[in-house]
Amino acid sequence: QNYDIFEIMSDLPQRFSHDNIFKALEKLRELHRPTRYPAKVLFEILNDQVTDNGNNEKDGKIMVPSLPSHYIELPQVIITPTRTIVQGFSVEMGNRIVRKFSHLNFLRVSFANDDFSNLFSDDFSIDICHRIKEISVQGIKINGQQFIFLAYSSSQLKEKSLWMVSCCTVERDAIRYWMGNLDIIKLPSKYAARMGQCFSTTVPTLSAGYSRYSPNKIKVCDTLPDLVTGEYCHSDGTGLIRRHRLKQVLKHVPFRPRNLDDVAIIQIRFGGAKGTLTAWDFETISGDGKSAILAKADVCLRPSMVKFTAPYENLEVIDVGSQLPYYLNRQMVFLLDFHQVPQQTILDIQSKMLDDLDEMIQSPEKAMDMLPRLAGPDHNLVASLLSVLRCGFLPSEEPFLLSCLHAIRSHHLVQLRKKTRIHVSKGAVLMGGIDETGILPEGCVFVKVRPKQPLFPPYFHRDNGAVNGANCENEDVDEDGYKVLEGPVLLTKHPVIHPGDVRMLLAVNVPELKDQKNVILFSQHGSRPEADKMAGSDLDGDQFAVCWDDRLFLRGWWKKYPHHRHSDDDNGNNNDDKKEPLSPYAAKILKRVNHPPMEYKCDQKAAIVPKVTDEHIITHFVNHAKSETLGRIATLWLDYAATKKDAGCNECLELANLHSIAVDFPKSGIPAIVSGK
């Protein structure tokens, strides 16, 4: 919602008389039904009053602010087993298709129960499947305008929704031709996934260009070779961007951080390519025959990133690398128990979280310390609450502030009860990248984070420039509050469901990587990428959790490598001055602690077709809706792990294999079949 009712109310007395304000608010209260856009309606009422009363107001007629350029208003329709319901417009981020062909030509169609609840796989009877196919093939007619099926993204496939386009104003074939060349893809599920790639919600930034007379345009190279070892690709889904170009790109991103140096990686869509770009000074990584390629380009893409052929027009950003708080969940708790982490340790961390939430209600200092580190609340809300606290307001004296803090506390208590979400203060969730220098040895990672979040979130812009300090007491940090982790760390990638998904690696300090902040850089060495060992992940935007709290490390790590601990000793004393230098063989020693990773492979393959048609794509949409078993597999895994008290039992391992198949179902077309046993 772009119109802020509170911001408007604070500005009205300077622009309108009190009498007209009260009249407008009274009309707003007397509306026949509630509205989702009170600020917009209030503006319209005031505009009408200004027109009726003449020019007797201070600033004359006031205009309703428009949406930001990267947002659009989309009409929505919900299809139930018995009804077709027009929902009106919803505000969301745009994509390259609606920006090119105007959002007025598109329709978002969702399938749900008659009570608007989600349709589950068991709900898809023959009649419902036939209704979905019939509507998808024939289209929908609204207000005399015919809408026909166009495509669906990966997220829409899970939400059981799709895109339709008006055939009265734009040709569907023209849109698909503009997307790129997809004819070489003969698997319907993969064809649909590649089309959906164009519907990712993105922010357009700089355009591509190859002329020397276009210095503000990006020069692109898509021939940078992948880093391959045997059958595995270490650089799967990641490329490079010049550091100064990244800063230019970030200036177009509304959710960029206050300090552009805090970003070292971005998730992008670029033509037919998808993945991440890590910022580098190309001069420092120009060895191994890459000099000629890097010298002519601002952005270097790898073959693993290019999914289909399409012109490189605009570099589109999906997300920027940032440090997110880390929470344990039920699956992680079971796997830590499997790895012999004491249950009392989990209870101690949970108790600390509960104490902090209780103290946050009473202490402004604790609230300012906790709010930036908690996930859940809206970014703007956090920034507003921090501003209120900085101004000296106390929760005990300001009811609105107290109610907001209570709501945040209640949110985390509910999440703790339902999902066992336990906040880990010595942990972070970061986007993954590759060490392009080749310095990191096998089994090592480079991580540079803020041990404690700054007083103001990095996305909060201060009018007077930089924020003083990073609120990092008793930490060996630089002037920006960052610290390079050194020593053993626990890494995983959610959803985590196999004992081998939780791994011990060695974090090392490499001076050449000092500018890589808020990103996990993996080594390009080894027979198998470390990212692939964790739930079969790659580096196209996957988020990895890193923990440096040695209480959660896999049991036996200190026997293998006893000389380095991150946390304080039992007396509360910091052990930094007692740490011995890191052994060059430490990573190999820690490797013995890890459980063998799972081999994420599926022998079954979906049938290919000579030419993919709409019927094939719609059939895959229906098959996925009625055969999707990911939630059921995750629930069964929790049930077996709890009843057998062993997350490594045969049933859990079998379900872990089915889980990997179910995760790949949208792209592979192979469903995970859960037996009746």
Image (tube, helix red, strand yellow):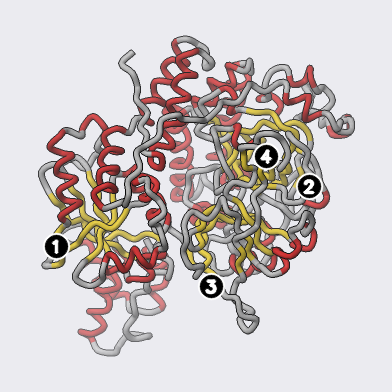
**Residue 113 occupies quadrant:** top left
Q: Nearer the viewer, mark 4 or mark 3?
A: 4
What quarter of the picture does the N terminus occupy?
bottom left
Q: Secondary structure at mark 1?
A: strand
Where does the image place residue 134, in percent across and percent down from the top left? 15, 48
Mark 1 lies on residue? 142
**First in sequence: mark 1 vs mark 2:** 1
Which numbered disc covers residue 473? Answer: none
Q: Nearer the viewer, mark 2 or mark 4?
A: 4
Mark 2 lies on residue? 477
| Residue at (24% x, 73% y) in the render | 45
Mark 4 lies on residue? 229
Asked if marks 3 and 1 touch (Cβ < 8 Å), the reply is: no
Per the model, the C-alpha gap separating discs 4 and 3 is: 34 Å
| Residue at (26% x, 71% y) in the render | 170
Per the model, the C-alpha gap separating discs 1 and 2 is: 60 Å
Question: What amino acid type should be assigned to the residue bearing mark 3?
Answer: Ser
Question: What amino acid type should be assigned to the residue bearing mark 2?
Answer: Val
Where does the image place residue 216, in percent across and percent down from the top left? 61, 77
Q: Secondary structure at mark 4?
A: strand
Mark 3 lies on residue? 207
Q: Nearer the viewer, mark 3 or mark 1?
A: 3
Where does the image place residue 56, in percent across and percent down from the top left? 30, 88
**Residue 199 occupies quadrant:** bottom left
Q: Residues within 10 Å of mark 4 (few under 14, many from 20)?
A: some
**First in sequence: mark 3 vs mark 1:** 1
Per the model, the C-alpha gap separating discs 4 and 1 is: 54 Å
